[in-house]
Structure formats: structure tokens, C-alpha cells
Amino acid sequence: MDPDNRHESPGSGEHTATDLWTLARAASDDGKWFTGLRLAQRALKHLDGRAAADPVLRARILVALAYNNSELGHPDRARALLEEASACPEVLPAVQVARGLILVRTGQPDAALADLDAAVAQLRRSSTPESLEDLAGALINRGLLHIVAGRLAPAAADTAAAGAIARELHRGDITFMADHNLGFVRYLAGDLPAALAAMEGAAIAWPRAAQDGVSPLDRARVLASAGLIDAAGEHIDQALEFFRINRATADLVDAYSVRAELDLLAGHPEAAARAARRAEQTARRRGNVPAALAARTLRLQAVRAQRRAMAVDRSGASAAARIGRARRDAIEAAALAAQLGELGLDEEANTALLLHGEALLDSGEVAAANEVAQVVRDRSGVRLATRLQARLLDGELELAAGRRRAGLAHIRRGLDDLSKFQATFGSQDLQTAAAVHGRELAELGLRTAVETRSPAAIFQWLERARGVSTRLPAVRPPADPQFARELGEFRASYEQARQAVLSGRRDPALEVRVRRMRRQVQAMAWTAAGTGAVLRPLTLAAVQRRLAADPARPSIVAYIRGDGALHALVITGPRASFRRLGAFEEIQSRVRRVSADLDLLATQRVPEPVLRVARQSLAAGLDKVSGDLLEPIGGLLDDGPLMVAGLGMLTTVPWGLLPALVGRPVSVTASVSAALGERKGREPRADRVLSVAGPGLPNGAAEAEQVAALYPGSTALVGDAATGAAVLGQVPDGGMLHIAAHGHHETESPLFSWVQLADGPLYGYDIAPNPSLPDHVVLSSCDVGRGDDDRPGGEPLGLAAALLRSGVSTVIAGVSRISDVVAAQTMVVYHQRLRSGDGPAVALAAAVAAADGAPAPLTCFGVGA
């Protein structure tokens, strides 16, 4: 379609100048600046071709032309058009608003405010619908100026007033902008859940208005602040495409900058440098020096990441080359900080100063770096990222001076700041994703503690590094009808798309809709606010006292990755020890081989010769993994139950199958503090057990009925009766939920992991917010115990971990595929042992050891006692 016609009504015929001007404004409101420019040019040509042109209409067309020229990167042309339009006093407020926007876009906020104040004052003198509409637009734009300047109270007041006027006039586009911008104000105030709620609500209420590039750009900013890199990336890519198509160069500067921030968070400094360079070049072409310098700050952050990566990989440049590069970076950062300070961009200037200090430190100039750090300390930073970077530099400086205690104190305060930020979220996704902002602090703290080889110091930093699991109370998704409806609609569409794939008739349009619906469900969950509570982790001494008081003589092993090696911290009542085990990559590779063998052995219709090879490979692999993880520390363990504080992929080791642990009770936890702080598991009451079987498991119904038979008065749901609604309606609060069903582990968002029931998937998002929450969940026939192995601090994030974070005490789940025959046999023994009084870990150890035929890679997560 011709871009000139995208905002014209079909069959409209010849347009008047007024029609074309109206269409030009509509195109501009949608962010389609080039289309708006062409339409405004046609309007002016049409009007000037008439004998008696309306001077007011002509001036309004000139203002529209100025808007579009400014956004397309021609501010001088826009100023000339506004100068011509200002000769018409009736449109002077519109001229002032447009001129104010140009001044904002070119980095002159004070002059812009004078124009916008004058426009608002004049427009308030009239109550005509046209003047009120212009007033709403002027207030929106003045609110944006206040946002840019960080004046949040007047920004909120102007934006709310604009929204009220827009609602009176039934102007959905302006109402959307007001509601969306109020969300952005909340984001700047630090309330990310409220910001996401406002932006999502505006997009749902006014979907057409949300199709521009600004809405996804702003949502990307909020999601980036929360650490949700993938979700933010989808939004920013959408915004970049829109801005490129419509040649919106002013917005492209912001979009490239956010893209650079995301690439930095994702650990891709080369890509970040490219995006930041594009932002800087685009801003300079527009004549916006402040925006160009802010983009250069991002580029120097990428340079800093590259420099530090080069220092870790010493096989590359020589020490002299690294020092030379650091000195050059320090000079550039110092000059940039001075320029930013002169322009009043204090936050960016602080970031540049921190980059200056870090580069000086990397070049060995510790005293000079200290002087720079002191300058930053004397200022008050607002952004969390700036505060954390300052804590990191202070910690590094103290460590460089040999003051380890002082250095660790700075790092600890930084992680405390991060925990307080995470505690504002009521979403597991956001809490865990935000840990990326403290990755360097956590790694430095743990690395420094490991260097001491002090078990007490190492334990403290291990628990702090896994802050989500250790320091934040359990959180559950919102239990509200709208969330349930959205999830139900997603479930139906997801199942429809899945069946289409299984039948060989994929529906790409349906799959796109499913992805959109999934994001909408997630966005609703992300809007939940947290309690703000931050817990204190236990000390090593407190842990040892609890272990010593337990007659079962339990032991704890916490696995730690550092400097390419895997280490183990072994804790018992009488003592604590620290050992290096071996090269991490080699051990991880063997764990993956074991997992692959287990998956193969659980697959149906595999030829016997292949199975024989897989059994031999598995036996050898289990021996090697047992030797890697347990043999070096075997003499340090007591002979009772074992609690494993897992690290990433090691949470999915089939611990009960390792030769050194066969028959021994093992429970896996992300946090020792959290696990020891939980109450002991309770024997399930007969009237508080629900046993369920999903479709497609030949032995599933028999398993569910056998389990139910062990608890007289309990309920079994099998066949068509095993629906999601039936399960959720009969989940025993504080009791046990046993599900024998196929399932799927979702790495990106674990609460989207599911088990298959008669009417489709039952998600973690179904179970976690349900009014009745079980204390003990058994997922016997699927591998949803798998976790994500690359989270900051080694935070596990599979469905099992997600259920534990929702308040469930114990989860029994597979860490690899499992034969449903073996699962059924193992589960009957497991429940028999529970009924006899054993705790979950003891019962599972006995059941796994008694498994006949194929192995049973089931693990007890959470409370095992």
C-alpha cells in the first residue's frame, strides 16, 4: 500500500486540505512520521492551490509539517516552519508545544519548559473542545518533559490531568498515552510492578493506540530494569522495526540505547557496542548532543566489559597491552564525565566516573581510582545499576589494598540493595531475573570468600549469592478471576496448537497468537507487588547447631563453581570443610551424558542392543559422577541423610542412583537457610491426598488408584475425570497432590511448565495461586525436576523450584525421563514407606533402591525430613 494512503478511508475520493491535515495528524499520533509528512505536504499544496486559503488551517498544517520534520531528523527545517506558523496568533499555543518538543529532542529542556508553560497557560483560558484537546496534548508533552528531567510529581500531575480531559472528550489515543506515561512515571519511581500493570492495562484498553513503537520501547525499558532480557528483547526488536520503517530517528536513539543495555546484561559486549554506536551516531545527526553523550556512556560500558573479559582470558593480549588499553579507556571516560556534568546529566556523569575509576584500577593506578570513587561517594545516585556499580568499585578498591573485610562489606551492602529491589516483586520470574544486576558483585564476593578457604565465609557468600532462594519469602502468582480466564484461554489455544503440530498440520498464525497470549499471562503475573521483606541467611554456626541437634546425623554438601573448577563445602554438626573437586566443564559433561543415557533407557521401542550399550554407558557414567562429586569428600560426611545445595545443572543429578548414595536419603535444595528454616514434612492424612493420572500413560491410572488405595478416604481422578478444574477444585490444602502424567519443562518461565491432564495442560501457574496449596507434590512420570543451569548465583529455576518458591514444602520429581512402569512400581513403594512413618527423602531412597528393571531418576526437592 502507498504510505500516503495508509491513513485514508477506502473509497473516500478526493480529500480536502482539512481532511489531509486530519489524516496527517492521525499518522503522526501513530508514530508514522514519514506518512504524516507526505500527507501534510499534500494538504499544504492543496490549500495553497485555492484562491482564498484559510490562514489558520495553513498555520496548523505548518505545525504538522514541523512535527514530522523534527521527528524525521530535520530540526532546523522544523524551526523555520514554526517561525512561519507563529504569524497566526490563533495557533500560537500549538507552535509553542511543537517548539518545546523540538527543544526537548535536541537536549534543551529549560527552554522547552518555557514554551510549554506558555502554551498550557493560554489554552486553559478557553473551554472549547478544540482547545481542550490541544490542552490535553500540551499537558502530555509537558509531562514528558518533566519525566525526562526526573521531576516525577509534576510529571504525574500533568499526565493525569491530560488523561482526565481525554476521557471527557472520548479521545482514546490521548487516554492511552496518559495511562501509559503514568506507568512510565511509576517505573522511574522504582515501582516496576505498578509500571507494568499500568502499561499492560493501557495496551489492553486501547490496543490500536498501543501499536506504535513507543509502547514496546517503554515496556522494554521496564523489563530490562527487572532483568527480563528475553521479554525485553522481543519488545525492543518490535520498536526498532517500527521506528526504522517510519524513519523515527528521535525514537531510534532511545531504542538503540535500550538494545545496548540488554546486550550488556546478556553478556554480549560486542553487540552492545554496535547498538550504542548507532544510538550515538543517530543522535549526533539530529543535533542532540546530550543523547549522543549518554549513548557514548553505554558504548564505554561495553568497552569496559570487553576489557575485563580480556583480563580474564590471559591467552590474548599481553599485560602491557591490557594496561595500555585501560589507561586509554580511563582518559576517554574522564572526558565524557566532564561533558555530561556540564550538561547536568548527573546520573550518566556518575556512570562515566565509575567507568573512569574502574579503568584506572585496571591499569594499576589504585590511588587515582580511589580519588575518583570518593567523588562518586559524595554524590547521591538514583539508579540501582549505578549504586551497584559503585559498590563493586568500592569493594574492588578495598580488596586491591588488601582490606578483605572492608571489601566484602561493600559487596554485601550492594547485594542487600539488590535484595530489597527484588523484594518489591511478587513474581518469581522478576525476582530471579533481577539477580543479573548483581552478577558481578555475587561472583566477586564468592570468589573472594573461596580464596580465604574459610568455611564460614564461603557459606555466608554462597547463601547471599543465591539471594532469591535464601533471602526472599515465598511468592505466589495472583489468584484473581481475570488471571484465571487469561490462563484458561492460553491453555485452550496452546493445546490446539500442540495438537496441530502432532497431527503434522502446523498453524503458524495460531502459534503467533499463543506466544502473544503467553506474554499476556506473564505480564499479568509480573504486575504483582512483593512484600518488601528480606530475610537474613543463617550463619554456618547456626547451621551446625541444628545439624548437631539432629540424632539422624545429617550432612550438607554445597557445590560451588569458581575459577573453572567445582568445589564442595561439607557441613556436619562437628565440623565444616572445603575441598576442590575437579574441572567444572568435565564434570558437567559427564552429568549430561548420564542424563542422555537415562532419557534413552526410558524411551519405548528401542532395540535391545542399543539399550544394552546405554545401560553400560549409564553404569560407567554414574560411577564417574559419583567419583567426581562424592569420593573426594566421602570421609567428611556423617552417615545420616544428605542435603545437597545444588548449583545449576547439578540440581538435576540423579543422586539416588549414584553408587555412593544408593539407599541413602538425599534432598536437594537451592538454599540451606530456606530448607532448614522450613517445618518438617508431615505424614499425609488419608483425607488430604489427591491422586491423579493423565492420559497417554499405560500404567498411569493403575498407579493413581494404587496410591489412593494406600490412603483410605482419599480421592483418585483418572480418565476423563482427571481435568484441570477437577484437580484444582480438590487439591487438599496442606496435603499431598500426586500426579502421574506426561509433562514438559519450560526453561524460560518455570511456572509455564505443565503436566498433561484429560482436558489439556495443567500449569505451575494453575497450582501456585490456587486457594488450596498442597504441602507435598509428587510428579512421578515426567522430568519437570529439570532446572535452568545458567542463572546468576546458580539459582535453580525448574518447576520443582518454582513450586517450592510458591510455598510447597516438598516436591518429588524426575530429573530425566522415566519409564511409566518403573514410576508406578517406585511410587507404590514410596507411598508405602510414607504411610509407615518415613520422611520423603528416606521413603524415596528406599523406593529408588528397590526399583526393578530400568532406573528411577527421581529426586526429593525441598524438605526431606
Image: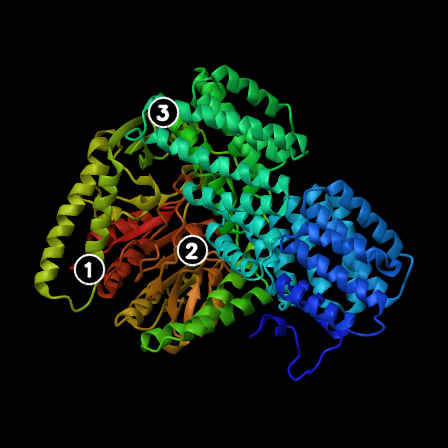
Q: Which residue is mark 3?
A: 321
Q: Residue furthest left?
A: 609
Q: Give me the residue at 73% from left, 70% from top.
A: 45
- Give the left or right position of residue 626, taking residue 468 as reference: left
Secondary-structure class at tag 1:
helix
Quadrant location of the C terminus in the rendered image: top left
**Numbered disc in front, either 2 or 3:** 3
Cα gap from disc 1 to disc 3, whole angstroms: 50 Å
- Up-down: is 605 above or below 466? below
Q: Which residue is mark 1?
A: 600
Q: Of the numbered discs in the image, which one, if any, rests on residue 750?
A: 2
Which quadrant would residue 140 be assigned to in this image? bottom right
- Up-down: is 507 above or below 703? below
* Depth check, front residue: 276 or 46: 46
**Residue 620: percent from left, percent from top:** 13, 46
- Give the left or right position of residue 692, taking residue 57 as reference: left
**Residue 147: percent from left, percent from top:** 70, 46
Q: Is residue 533 visible?
A: no
- Give the left or right position of residue 415, taking residue 172 as reference: left
Secondary-structure class at tag 3:
helix
Labels 2 and 3: the sequence-earlier one? 3
Amino acid carrying label 1: it is Leu
**Residue 113: percent from left, percent from top:** 78, 45
Quadrant location of the N terminus in the rendered image: bottom right
- Up-down: is 354 above or below 500? above
Q: Give me the residue at 57% from left, 31% from top.
A: 336
